Each structure stands twice: as C-alpha cells, then as structure tokens.
Amino acid sequence: MKRILEELSSLRGSRARVLLCDDQPINIRLANALLKGDYDIYMATSGVQAIEQCEKVQPDLILMDVNMPGLNGYETCERLKQNTATLGIPVIFLTGLNSEEDEARGFDVGGVDFISKPIHGTVLKARVLTHLTLKLQSDFYRNIAVTDSLTGLFNRRKFDSELAEKWELCKRSGQAISLLMIDIDYFKRYNDHYGHQAGDQCLAEVAHAIRSNFHRSYDCVARYGGEEFACILPMAGSEQAIKLAENVCQAVARLKLPHARSEVGPHVTLSIGVASITAPDPGSSPAGLIALADQNLYQAKAHGRAQVYA
Ligand code: GH3
Ligand code: MG
Ligand code: MG
Ligand code: MG
C-alpha cells in the first residue's frame, strides 16, 4: 500500500496532505508525531478553521475531532460535503466518543472512517494510509478522464460537460457566455512536410501557448479534436472574447514555429471563430453557440486564415 501511495504522490509531484482538526493541541501533537514523517501536516483547532484550511490547502484527508466548541466535527463535515470544492476530501473522525450511534452519525454526515481514542499508532497509520491511497488513486483517474494526453488540455468529454454546466449557470444568472473555436491553418501540410511526430510536438506547443492566455479559474480550454481547440468563457461578452482570441493568435505567432508549406506566411498560424450570447434564453441549449462559432471559424478560413472572425 505504501509503495502505491508513494508512486501516486510522485506522479502528481507533491506529498499527501493531512489536516488535523482538534480543539485540544495535545491531541494534534500526538497525531502529528505519528504522521509527520510521511505526510505534509496542516492543523486547525476549530471547525471554522478547518473549513478555511480546506479551501486554502486542499488536504487529501482530514482527521476530525467530534467534540469541539462552536461547530462540532459532524457539523464541520456536513459543511465540507455541501461545498463542491471540498466535498471530495475524505474525513476520518478521531474522537473520544465510542457508541454505535456516534459512529453511525459519523458515516451519516459523510465520514469515511471512525476511530475511537485512545489512539493506537499502528492502526491509525494504517487507516490513514488506506484512505490516502484511495483518495490519490481517485484523483489520478479523475484527472486522466478529463485530460487530453498529448496537450495536457481538457479533453472533449470535459469540454462537453463544462459547456452544459456553464451554459446553465449563465442562463440562470442572465450573464453572457462566449466560445472560441480555434483551428491550426494548413496542418495537414505541416504533417506531410515535417512528419507526424513533429506535428504532435507542434500541437503540444500551440496548446501551451493558447492556454497561457487564460487566467480565470472558470475558463475552460480544451482540445476539441484533431488540430482544433475550443475555449469556453463564461461571463464574458463579445468584446472580451474577441480580445482574447486576438491575444491567442499573437501568442502562437510569437512561437514562430516554422511552417514551410503554409500559404499565409512562414510560421504556424491559427484561425478562430468567436461566438457570444448576451444571456442564454430559457429552454435553449449550447448547440447554437457551437454552430455559430463553427460558422465564424469557417468564415475566418474563407477570408484568408490567420485571423479572428466574430
Ligand atoms: P485548414 O487550414 O483548412 O484547417 O487545413 P488543415 O490542413 O489544417 O485541415 P484538415 O482538416 O484538412 O487537416 C487537419 C490535419 O490535422 C489532418 C490530420 O492529419 C492532422 N491531425 C489531427 N490530429 C492530429 C494529431 O493528433 N497529431 C498530428 N500530428 N496531426 C493531427
Ligand atoms: Mg475535542
Ligand atoms: Mg480542422
Ligand atoms: Mg486546420
């Protein structure tokens, strides 16, 4: 088990993070002494502090006391499970309570395990290791499920679910949403001239340059298919979307990737179709937004490529 966790930690490039939450510093010290050799430890002495820490450091596991002044451990766990940003963090209760009802309540509010004090070091360490391994494994597979392996961008599956979600969000809140459809110009010729492996390398570099223009956490940049990319910009109107699209073109131009067979210049260029909706109509679906971005991409190609069309 330990080897698997070490492998998963090294794959993601950071040690597992454990948050210790207990109102008694002596209990935190005890658990810390047992775990600090293997994990990065964070501490909280109240439920409110634990919630703050969760949002800040995204721990992989919480050891949670139950009896605490203010929010108790059960209430804290319930709050964490109501927030999409923290609901995936497993909670192990570590408490002086030991009745069947107490334990059942712990599972009821979303805990994954329940350990009654006094602490037995080897058992605590084994349970922590088990739950951390499950957590990092699940993160690993979830990550693979949404990532395009060549470019590191989100994949088409994630794009589809993000668009549906962000469309509904903008519909409910009456806000604008924009979409960029991006296509590399004359890419078939690039492959023919430089070879498929160089083509792959080019796709990865272009993807990285595209990504570097997006700084809002809720923007989604995806590989839509082949040499096409798509970006969802929730809460962004046409002006902002066009500006971003221009920036994306310039970022790729700055790479100066040689393209001897392109008809629009000596370097790799992009054509981008931009579509924006001021506020999605009730009952509407995002299919119209995709169709519009596609049409505008076609226009960008027809008007000579290496340009943004909105
Ligand atoms: P246009 O300017 O009209 O977009 O021309 P194009 O040649 O870019 O468009 P076309 O759709 O004819 O060709 C796209 C090419 O992209 C064909 C395909 O070989 C290449 N391609 C798609 N996916 C990959 C990939 O993963 N790796 C590599 N190397 N090439 C890919
Ligand atoms: Mg306590
Ligand atoms: Mg294409
Ligand atoms: Mg193309």
Image (spheres, grey):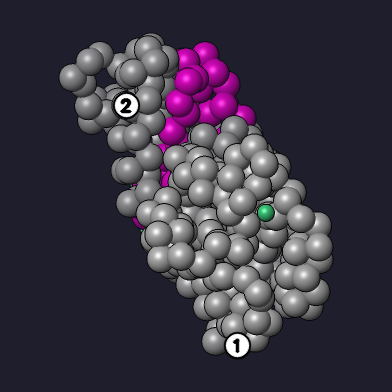
What residue type is disc 2 on? Glu
Quadrant of image for the N terminus: bottom right
Residue 186: x percent and y percent?
42, 48
Q: Name the spot of residue 95 as percent of width and height, x first.
A: 60, 63
Residues packed near mark 2 inside 10 Å, few (<14), some (14 to 19) or many (20 plus): some
Q: Residue shown at 23%/30% (left/top)? A: 287
Residue tagged by mark 2?
Answer: 168
Give the magenta range. 222-248
Residue 203: image location, x then y, percent: 51, 56
The residue pinned by badge 1 equals: 3
**Residue at 33%, 43% in the rendered image:** 161
Instruction: Kindly give the residue lying farthest to the front in the view shown.
Output: 99
Q: Which callout, 2 or 1, points to the residue nearer the camera? A: 1
Rounded to the nearest whole Å, what is the CA distance between mark 2 and mark 1?
A: 43 Å
Q: Is residue 302 above or below residue 67?
A: above
Neighbor class of circle 1 (other Cα within 10 Å; few <14, some 14-19, many 20+) is few
Q: Quadrant of residue 282?
A: top left
Q: Amino acid at mark 1?
A: Arg
Earlier-in-chain disc, 2 versus 1: 1
* Residue in view at x 57 percent, y 50 percent: 73
User: What element does badge 1 sit on?
Assistant: helix
The front one of 176 and 189 is 176
Image check: 276 left or right of 27?
A: left
Q: Is residue 79 above or below residue 58?
A: above
Is residue 223 in the magenta section? Answer: yes
Q: Is residue 77 magenta?
A: no
